[in-house]
Amino acid sequence: MDKSIQEEIASRRTFAIISHPDAGKTTMTEKLLYFGGAIRDAGTVKGKKTGKFATSDWMEIEKQRGISVTSSVMQFDYDGKRVNILDTPGHEDFSEDTYRTLMAVDAAVMMVDSGKGIEPQTIKLFKVCRMRGIPIFTFMNKMDRQGKEPLELMEELEEVLGIESYAMNWPIGMGKEFLGVYDRFNHRIEQARYDAEERFLELDEEGELKHPHAMTETSYYEQALEDVLLLNEAGNEFDEERVAKGELTPVFFGSALTNFGVQTFLETFLQFAPPPQPRSTKEEEAVSPYSDEFSGFIFKIQANMNPMHRDRIAFVRIVSGAFERGMTVTVPRISKTFKLTQTTQFLADDRETVNEAVAGDIIGLHDTGNYQIGDTVIGGKSSFQFDALPQFTPELFVRVTAKNVMKSKHFHKGILQLVQEGAIQYYRTLHTEEVLLGAVGQLQFEVFEHRMKNEYNVEVRMEHIGSKVARWIENEQNVKESMAGQRAMLVKDRYDNFVFLFENDFAMRWFHDKHPEIQLYSLL
């Protein structure tokens, strides 16, 4: 491999920001983009009154609700590194999109609301990161508001998530009395609400302020010194290897909204976040990012990023080698080759044509319906497939029809495209061909309804048929239609596989007792 390409790959840092909803995730993304020079003015998520919306919230429903419901991809350069951020939806109804996104990153930044501590969705996402063994960096956000005591937050982090932590800095006061942070890592104090020139104060060898300052007169400073002394004596030691394995999380305190501590966090994060990592395949051989052969996998498909053009973009995480526009790739799943001429890179919905990219980068391929989530793309003669991406078993189901039967063609086209994004799953009844949709959460149906109307000009009627226990069948050849009934609906999924939708767990157990020869299984 060319040395310049190796250097390019080594400069990549690809990570996702994860959190419970409203912990400040999208605001943090905005500030990072601001420091990277990608945007001039960081908008906030809840910009409904000002008309200013977050760059990473591009979909209309996101602007209305002030939440992220899709994963956005953004890229910028900082301090010699090429940074790829994936801003993920925090809402639990969209956890499937987030889980797949976490398969495409080399590190994660976990945002925690210092007033609320570790919340349920954070726990779920954290577990996925631990499962993959990727490094996790924690940002305790909203220190400009009254919240939990910092020692309490650290204790909760370790007890609830079961990971050891190391405080890179320590807050001096909080809320209106938030004076700044004691920066243990850089051996300085960073003052809140000060310009760049006055922001940093020097510490002496004893770890106290080197020059006289009004801060030393406050009880908050004294308390911070006591806490830092306690951390130095009884806390965990910083260990770069354990950070890389995801066993130790560096913790930063700050406020994304007021832009305090974000730049220091970014600089330290880029120092310890890993470059692109090898990825395992179904053939059990890991693919190195420095392999000469281009390869990648599709972790997301998004329809109508430009509603004017009715386009579909397949998001590819490049795993190895270098990409050049116009190159030919193979998709092993269907044994077909494609010439990649329409390719893009992103700043949320702002796209530009990309001619070259390397391992660690995220690129978008124009998709006419050939690609699926989880597909491997290879630029050489090898034939392998990367490990499968997680797919969830839906729990809620609706029967959906078009209000205007004359729009049947648009109705089916819209459903097909939105289903391929992976948030909702498509089923149809065997003889009446009724369309059923399954999802992990109710909000996904609301987003589906909104997008059908706004992007396909089709109003839909949705009839809730409640929660069901969906199970696929290992030995389909043994299934008979007569096995179905009121408590066990038999349908087909979009791949024409049989699926039983049981009324509840009791109905599933009753079916299993009556038909022990049928082998059922669920997705994740």
Image (spheres, helix red, strand yellow):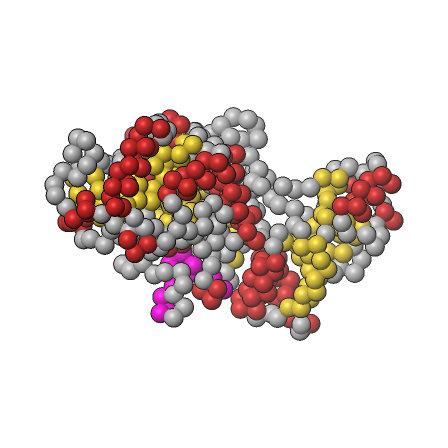
**Residue 157 at x, y = what percent?**
45, 39
Judge left or right: residue 512 versus residue 265: right
Residue occupying image coordinates x 78% and y 41%: 476
Residue occupying image coordinates x 39% and y 31%: 243
Judge left or right: residue 420 versus residue 494: left
Range covered by the magenta-colored residues: 50-62
Q: Kindly report the secondary structure that dominates the magenta region of the rendered protein.
A: loop
Judge left or right: residue 18 versus residue 217: right
Query: In the image shown, does 184 or 25 lie closer to the viewer?
Result: 184
**Residue 511 at x, y = what percent?**
83, 43
**Quarter placement of the N terminus:** top left
Residue occupying image coordinates x 61% and y 66%: 410
Q: How many marks?
A: 0
Examine the rendered structure and indicate whether residue 423 appears above or below residue 461.
above
**Residue 381 at x, y = what percent?**
50, 32
**Residue 516 at x, y = what percent?**
84, 36
Q: Which quadrant would residue 441 be assigned to in this image?
A: bottom right
Judge left or right: residue 446 versus residue 227: right
Q: Can residue 466 be seen from the camera position used here?
A: yes
Query: In the image shown, does 290 or 52 lie closer to the viewer?
Result: 52
Q: Can residue 9 be seen from the camera position used here?
A: no
Q: Which quadrant would residue 438 be assigned to in this image?
A: bottom right
Residue furthest to the left in view is 211
Q: Is residue 58 magenta?
A: yes
Q: Is residue 315 magenta?
A: no
**Quarter placement of the C terminus:** top right
Examine the rendered structure and indicate whether residue 418 appears above or below residue 401.
above
Query: In the image shown, does 294 or 307 lie closer to the viewer?
Result: 307
Residue occupying image coordinates x 61% and y 70%: 459
